[in-house]
Image (cartoon, rainbow, N blue to C red):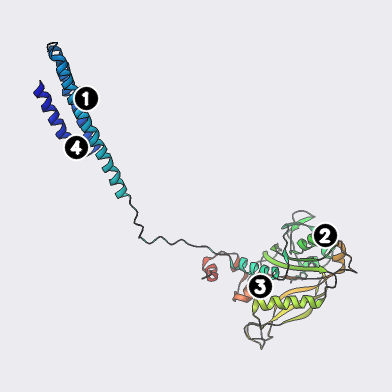
């Protein structure tokens, strides 16, 4: 019996040594230490032994079992370690591989132009003012010297929500609201950028939704020359330091006098070319001195305060600056168009 046990131990240790994965090792465990294994069988046969032999054999069986158990545990640890290493090796990342390029987005050309204009005026001490796109008829028309029935209301065919509420047709209502908040005390010096809406059939130069930037300065002693100096500075920063501007008389209900503002053609330097249709000048915005009625309605004393205002279309500015021939390009999100304005 003793020899049988030693033989079993020898056999088990060899099989443990040979097991090269955790499943094979577990099979060895079951085969030798399991309920149906040879060791259990030896224990069962101990009933046939004499009372003197029994404890001696018992101790021997336990010893053999412990030797096998220890060998199993040691091998298990080795195999587990090997498995972890194998897994680490198979999942290793080659950090020297070049990465997949990340597609980087960019600001929309219109956003860029709007922010450029904003920055330029912030540099002259203006602050940015914003307001609702769904606006009261009062702020969109009434407060801007366009009473109901005024023919100029037809110039700006509108999207009405109700009789009294519409999509704003210009950003002027933001200026009217801002003036009102000042409660008759200057100075007011603001730039109002934003989306505006007009009933229009879209074509190369018209869109039912577009953007506007208006500026307003109200204070004591504000004169037309302040307007001209401001807009000349704007034109030079936007289109080049050699540019000049000129005023032509015009009409807006909210300004008096009113002007159209031209910038000398950057393409020909003012000599006349196809870009400026031979005139040397290109219209970039409208402006004027704030109408006294507009000042009074907003709570300003028009004897004490004067102001100037101007309005421009960033789409038009961007089209002139970058030679874009169709306003619809701004809204169609064609990446072939947009990528031409990517910063390098
Ligand atoms: C244009 C002309 C203009 C204004 C906008 C304005 C606003 C207030 C008072 C007086 Cl609150 N005027 N805005 C003035 C003159 C012209 O826009 O051609 N825009 C694209």
Task: Say if disc 3 is inside 8 Å of ligand 1.
Answer: yes
Q: CA distance from mark 1 to mark 3?
A: 89 Å
> Residue at 77% of width from left, 80% of height from top?
248
> Residue at 52% of width from left, 66% of height from top?
335
Q: Which callout, 3 or 4, points at the residue further toward the start of the chain?
A: 4
Residue 320 placement: quadrant? bottom right
Q: CA distance from mark 3 to mark 4?
A: 81 Å
Residue 218 placement: quadrant? bottom right
Mark 3 vs 2: CB contact within 8 A? no
Disc 3 vs disc 2: which is toward the camera?
Answer: 2
Disc 3 vs disc 4: which is toward the camera?
Answer: 4
Q: Which residue is mark 4?
A: 19
Front in this rendered view, residue 274 or 320:
320
Disc 2 vs disc 4: which is toward the camera?
Answer: 4
Q: CA distance from mark 2 to mark 4?
A: 90 Å
Number of other residues with Cα within 10 Å of mark 4, as a class: few under 14, some 14 to 19, many 20 or more? some
Would residue 343 be seen by someone viewing this image from the given angle?
Answer: yes
Front in this rendered view, residue 147 or 200:
147
Residue 129 placement: quadrant? bottom right
Q: Which residue is mark 1?
A: 34
Residue 180's tag is 2
Q: Which callout, 1 or 3, points at the residue further toward the start of the chain?
A: 1
């Amino acid at each position: 019996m003793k020899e049988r046990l030693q033989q079993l131990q020898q056999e088990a240790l060899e099989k443990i040594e040979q097991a090269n994965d955790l499943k094979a090792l577990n099979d060895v465990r079951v085969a030798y230490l399991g309920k149906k294994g040879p060791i259990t069988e030896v224990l069962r046969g101990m009933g046939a032994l004499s009372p003197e032999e029994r404890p001696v054999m018992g101790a021997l069986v336990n010893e053999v079992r412990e030797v096998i158990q220890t060998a199993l545990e040691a091998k298990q640890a080795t195999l587990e370690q090997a498995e972890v290493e194998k897994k680490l090796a198979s999942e290793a990342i080659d950090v020297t591989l070049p990465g997949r390029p990340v597609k980087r987005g960019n600001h929309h050309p219109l956003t860029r132009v709007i922010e450029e204009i904003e920055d330029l005026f912030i540099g002259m001490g203006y602050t940015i003012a914003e307001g609702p796109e769904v606006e009261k008829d009062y702020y969109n028309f009434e407060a801007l010297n366009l009473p109901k029935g005024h023919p100029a209301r037809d110039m700006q065919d509108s999207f009405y929500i109700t009789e009294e509420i519409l999509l704003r047709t210009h950003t002027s209502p933001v200026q009217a609201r801002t003036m009102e908040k000042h409660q008759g005390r200057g100075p007011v010096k603001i730039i109002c950028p934003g989306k505006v809406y007009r009933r229009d059939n879209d074509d190369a130069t018209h869109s039912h939704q577009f953007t506007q930037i208006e500026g307003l300065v109200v204070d004591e002693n504000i004169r037309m020359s302040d307007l001209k100096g401001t807009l000349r500075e704007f034109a030079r920063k936007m289109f080049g330091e050699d540019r000049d501007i000129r005023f032509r008389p015009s009409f807006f209900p909210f300004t008096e006098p009113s002007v159209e503002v031209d910038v000398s053609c950057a393409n020909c330097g003012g000599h006349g070319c196809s870009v400026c249709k031979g005139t040397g000048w290109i219209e970039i915005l409208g402006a004027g001195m704030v109408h006294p009625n507009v000042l009074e309605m907003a709570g300003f004393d028009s004897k004490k305060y004067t102001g100037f205002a101007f309005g421009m279309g960033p789409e038009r500015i961007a089209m002139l600056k970058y030679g874009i021939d169709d306003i619809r390009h701004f809204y169609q999100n064609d990446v072939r168009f947009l990528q031409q304005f990517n910063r390098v």
